[in-house]
């Protein structure tokens, strides 16, 4: 597949920050108590990730290698602060729901990780796409976790009460780890099964000339 | 050279199987379970039954799915031949450590969680990191508010006793005691504690005499070592006395109220989740006692299940650093005596 | 290295780049801040708008410090556009002595308290099971507005005038929540509407009232015989009932413990460990007893200041005896001289609970009335009579004429009246009624003196209400 599709696929699935790379777990575990919070956090990280990747990619030739980490951190911190101020002014509910985890995005490993691994070495558009894809992968993971935890732990979905019955365990920290672990297992199983199928198909295709179908 | 016997293992057969030990534990639990039903009514029997049934069914379903039994249908019945009653014990224990007035789905959910997640996901019998019944209770405690409202056991009025004013709304004697109210310790009160008359608490934990009978049975059948529960209970009581300013009247209330006896005899002594060496066990039970008394004082709620859970997780650490006596090891000194004779 | 080398080197370049980035970012941030700043006021407004869905806060009021609330306190009071009051109240009496803080929207209509509009949980101290209280529990508080408007309060036990709201398994936390809501209601009633606060009374508060559950006082000439039930303090098992007599020098002339409420723990009877209080206290006056209590406070909460000579192993029981003695001597003057209508009353038993006082008053006969009346009166939190019953009617019987039958229907007439209204019926401001010359004409039914005696009992009850409540 072409370069851009590969980048997108990597960000969403192959290098999914939550289920594969297991980065940014702190925010994941704390903010998936409700699906809305999960989506909110994911989108915020996506925006910051895309912007930071773009800026860092723009500056990649300018920033010397020895000070790249402090430079990245300053840029990311600035972006996070701006986003904080915007949220505080215009979406105070989300701002309060995220609480202390909004400033913690600065040290979210995903952002620094992608900046270091990709944005500092690749052209602008690729980096932006990578940031977007990774962020969306993160959002997807958080949404799934949020839906499961909110449905089982509170009986509601995106704030709308669906079931009167709920098991408080899933809203707690213990439940967070538990659901997270189960989701990683399921995700890995699915990805492995799919890639196994693909490998088999490739192997069959390769061997086809030697084993003509009758 | 004497005869060399060559044969296939196992070379030493003993009638002690897991199944036999588990049946012994069930028998030991029966007096407390029966007293629980007597004190709390037939609904308690329903809860115990639901808990046991759910636990067994969960294990059955899990094994069927794991072994893909639809491919080899004989497994549906083979399972019962190899059934080792561990889930029966887990189910019964879980039923006994929840209050008698919880909705029916609580023991079911708790048993499913205890067996499927805590036992089977980690590898089945012998591989669980924490005691499944304790984990099931903690799961229920975190999830449902119904776990905090304890009903009052029937009082057959056999012992004239001074009753604290607000025992009716379900404050267990332990919470009363921990909230700072003096619990008048009279002879009648102690008798009620021992027999569980008019006491609030979980189904199996109020009748201490029944629990002690179970303890004696387990010791006689050599299922548990006699000193382990005693050490736990004694350390808890003594440390509670220390925390109350060396007031010895605090010893009996802290020992005879709450889930301490049940936890010490049946749950802390579980083979799988306790250390393998003697010294490790001493450390384990002393730590259990200290933390139980300390946390009870600090938080004012019943912490036995949480403390057992905590210490279960620490056990691998204890095992790593406290060396076991190797199987067959004989102390050097005695060996020297033998050779010198 | 030389300056030129340094300027060309990597370190300088890194420094410059970093500096530029930092300055640029700082500039961008300050520009953004200018546009996006959220002030404290805006934050407050946001918090309020979350609590008030179709209303908004007009102004924040200062807390009236003279209002005393039992079991709670009020932290913030705001007046809303619709004339309601948004109160942040803290209730005590929770688990392990902790508190719960709530926001309570008190609705008002026509200048009076109409009910609760909303209750929102804010924070707590020392509580453990706050998760047991869900939204429907807090909503329950908004469903009893009729009862609240007529004076009921929330409580955790089934009682008259109490709306029971409790969650099983968390009784103490429920207690704190209920106290917070009641504190909000009480505060609005007292500070904003001036109701249920200190009504008109000619005398000061009695001392130690908060330590006493009930008092029977029989006043004769210069002597007062009390039977005092002292509330338990600390670990003492039960209340004490003590008979004390105070003579004309305001000294204790007799002291007898009728009911000893000391604890019995195992074989230890704390009663045996008490000091010989009777011998110790007879002949002492108020100043001497206050010295033994060790504090000038008129409410004793613990034995920390009690004189060391009473640390005999049952210090709390001893202190309870001291409290009874202090009450007896400290209030002697009031009973004999200064209480309203005390000269008309032979003996009074007063039982105080929350905001209600139940009296049993023996009114001395006036004029031609044959005997004293004994009347049971209850006064509620608005200082109005809520119950009135003549237990012993001392009217004369002359031949076939029973003057009792000629009396007005005093019970119906007096229930719901305040002190001012009763004083109007008495027709005089004097605090001792000697004849019926000023009694209102409507009571001239042929048994005016009997009617007036009923009025006197009612006047005593309402006028001294605040004094007994303390």
Image: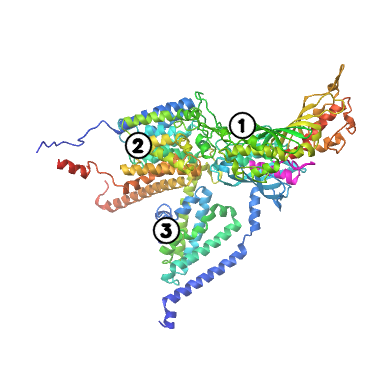
What colour-coding does the image apply?
Answer: rainbow
Residue A32's x, y, as percent? 49, 49
**Does residue A152 appear in this view?**
no
Residue A144: x, y in percent?
A: 47, 48
Q: CA distance from mark 3 to mark 1?
A: 89 Å
Residue at 56%, 69% in the rendered image: C27
Mark in the foreground, 3 or 2: 2
CA gap between label 3 and label 2 equals 67 Å
Residue B274 sits in quarter: top left
Residue A27, position as x, y percentages in the image: 48, 53
Work out whether residue A81 or residue B213 is closer to the camera in this orientation and state it: B213
Which residue shows up at 49% across the image and 33% down it? Answer: B201
Observer-nearest of C335 and A123 = C335
Closer to the observer: label 1 or label 2? 1
Q: Farthest residue in the top direction? A: C400
The image quadrant where one finds the C terminus of chain C is: top right
Q: Is residue A126 above or below residue C414?
A: below
Q: Is B199 included in the stretch rendered in magenta?
A: no
Tag 3 residue: A5
Chain letter for mark 1, please. C
Quarter-of-image position of residue C107: top right
Q: Which residue is mark 1?
A: C260
- The answer to whether residue A59 is above or below residue C384 is below
The chain to which mark 2 is attached is: B
> How many marks can you see?
3
Residue range corresponding to the magenta coloring: C179-207
- In the rendered image, which residue does mark 2 sit on? B227
């Amino acid at each position: 597949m072409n370069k851009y599709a590969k980048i997108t696929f990597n960000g969403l699935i192959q290098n999914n920050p939550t289920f594969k790379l297991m980065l940014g777990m702190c925010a994941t575990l704390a903010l998936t108590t409700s699906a809305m919070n999960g989506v909110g956090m994911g989108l915020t990280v996506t925006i910051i990730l895309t912007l930071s990747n773009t800026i860092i990619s723009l500056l990649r030739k300018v920033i010397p290698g020895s000070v790249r980490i402090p430079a990245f951190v300053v840029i990311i911190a600035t972006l996070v602060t701006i986003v904080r101020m915007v949220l505080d002014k215009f979406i105070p509910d989300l701002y309060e729901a995220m609480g202390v985890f909004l400033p913690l995005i600065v040290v979210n490993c995903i952002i620094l990780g992608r900046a270091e691994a990709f944005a500092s070495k690749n052209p602008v558009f690729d980096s932006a796409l990578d940031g977007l894809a990774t962020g969306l992968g993160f959002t997807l993971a958080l949404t799934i976790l949020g839906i499961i935890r909110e449905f089982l732990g509170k009986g509601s979905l995106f704030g709308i009460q669906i079931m009167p019955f709920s098991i408080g365990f899933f809203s707690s920290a213990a439940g967070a780890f538990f659901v997270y672990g189960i989701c990683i297992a399921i995700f890995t199983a699915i990805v492995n099964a799919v890639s196994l199928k693909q490998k088999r198909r490739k192997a069959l295709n390769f061997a086809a000339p030697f084993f003509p179908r009758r | 050279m004497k005869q060399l016997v060559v044969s296939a293992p196992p070379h030493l057969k003993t009638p002690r199987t897991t199944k036999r030990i588990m049946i012994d534990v069930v028998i030991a639990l029966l007096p407390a379970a029966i007293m629980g039903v007597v004190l709390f009514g037939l609904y308690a029997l329903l809860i115990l039954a639901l808990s046991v049934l759910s636990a067994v069914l969960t294990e059955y379903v899990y094994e069927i799915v794991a072994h893909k039994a639809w491919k080899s249908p004989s497994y549906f019945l083979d399972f019962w031949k190899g059934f080792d009653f561990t889930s029966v014990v887990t189910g019964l224990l879980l039923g006994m450590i929840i209050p008698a007035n919880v909705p029916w789905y609580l023991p079911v959910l708790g048993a499913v969680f205890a067996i499927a997640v805590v036992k089977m996901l980690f590898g089945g019998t012998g591989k669980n990191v924490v005691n499944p019944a304790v984990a099931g209770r903690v799961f229920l405690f975190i999830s449902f508010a119904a776990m905090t409202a304890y009903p009052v056991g029937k009082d057959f009025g056999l012992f004239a006793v001074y009753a604290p004013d607000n025992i009716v709304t379900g404050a267990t004697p332990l919470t009363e005691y921990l909230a700072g109210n003096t619990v008048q310790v009279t002879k009648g009160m102690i008798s009620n504690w021992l027999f569980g008359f008019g006491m609030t608490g979980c189904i199996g934990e109020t009748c201490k005499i029944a629990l002690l009978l179970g303890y004696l049975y387990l010791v006689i059948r050599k299922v548990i070592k006699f000193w382990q529960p005693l050490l736990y209970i004694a350390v808890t009581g003594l440390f509670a006395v220390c925390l109350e300013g060396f007031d010895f009247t605090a010893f009996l209330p802290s020992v005879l109220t709450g889930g301490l006896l049940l936890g010490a005899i049946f749950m802390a002594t579980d083979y799988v989740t306790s250390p393998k060496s003697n010294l490790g066990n001493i450390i384990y039970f002393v730590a259990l006692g200290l933390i139980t008394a300390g946390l009870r004082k600090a938080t004012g709620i019943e912490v036995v299940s949480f403390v057992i859970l905590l210490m279960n997780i620490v056990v691998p650490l204890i095992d790593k650093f406290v060396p076991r006596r190797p199987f067959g090891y004989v102390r050097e000194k005695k060996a020297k005596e033998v050779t010198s004779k | 290295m030389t300056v030129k080398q340094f300027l060309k080197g990597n370190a300088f370049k890194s420094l410059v780049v970093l500096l530029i980035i930092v300055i640029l970012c700082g500039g961008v941030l300050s520009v953004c801040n200018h546009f996006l700043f959220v002030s404290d006021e805006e934050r407050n407004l946001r918090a309020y708008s979350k609590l008030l869905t179709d209303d908004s806060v007009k102004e924040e009021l200062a807390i009236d410090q003279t209002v005393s609330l039992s079991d709670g306190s009020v932290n913030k009071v705001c007046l809303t556009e619709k004339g309601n009051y948004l109160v942040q109240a803290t209730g005590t009496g929770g688990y392990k002595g902790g508190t719960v803080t709530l926001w309570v929207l008190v609705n008002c209509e026509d200048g009076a308290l109409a009910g609760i509009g909303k209750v929102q949980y804010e924070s707590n101290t020392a509580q453990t099971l706050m998760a047991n209280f869900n939204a429907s529990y807090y909503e329950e508080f908004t469903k009893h507005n009729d009862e609240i408007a007529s004076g009921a309060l929330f409580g955790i036990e089934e009682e008259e005038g109490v709306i029971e709201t409790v969650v099983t398994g968390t009784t103490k936390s429920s207690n704190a929540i209920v106290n917070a809501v009641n504190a909000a209601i009480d505060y609005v009633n007292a500070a904003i509407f001036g109701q249920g606060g200190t009504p008109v009374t000619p005398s000061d508060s009695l001392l130690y009232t908060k330590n006493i559950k009930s008092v029977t006082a029989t006043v004769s000439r210069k002597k007062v015989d009390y039977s005092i039930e002292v509330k338990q303090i600390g670990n003492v098992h039960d209340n004490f009932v003590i008979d004390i007599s105070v003579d004309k020098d305001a000294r204790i002339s007799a002291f007898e413990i009728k009911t000893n409420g000391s604890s019995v723990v195992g074989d230890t009877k704390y009663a045996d460990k008490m000091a010989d209080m009777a011998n110790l206290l007879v002949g002492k006056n108020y100043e001497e007893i206050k010295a033994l209590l060790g504090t000038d406070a008129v409410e004793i909460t613990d034995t920390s200041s009690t004189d060391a000579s009473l640390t005999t192993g049952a210090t709390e029981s001893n202190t309870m005896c001291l409290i009874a003695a202090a009450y007896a001597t400290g209030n002697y003057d009031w009973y004999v001289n200064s209480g309203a209508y005390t000269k008309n009353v032979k003996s009074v038993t007063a039982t105080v609970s929350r905001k209600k006082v139940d009296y049993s008053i023996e009114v001395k006969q006036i004029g031609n009335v044959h005997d004293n009346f004994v009347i049971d009166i209850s006064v509620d939190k608005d200082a109005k009579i809520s119950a009135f019953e003549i237990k012993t009617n001392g009217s004369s019987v002359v031949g076939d004429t029973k003057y009792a039958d000629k009396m007005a229907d005093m019970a119906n007439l007096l229930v719901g009246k305040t002190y001012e209204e009763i004083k109007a019926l008495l027709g005089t401001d004097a605090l001792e009624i000697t004849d019926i010359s000023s009694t209102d004409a409507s009571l001239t039914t042929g048994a005016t003196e009997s009617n007036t005696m009923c009025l006197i009992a009612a006047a005593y009850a309402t006028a001294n209400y605040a004094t007994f409540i303390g």
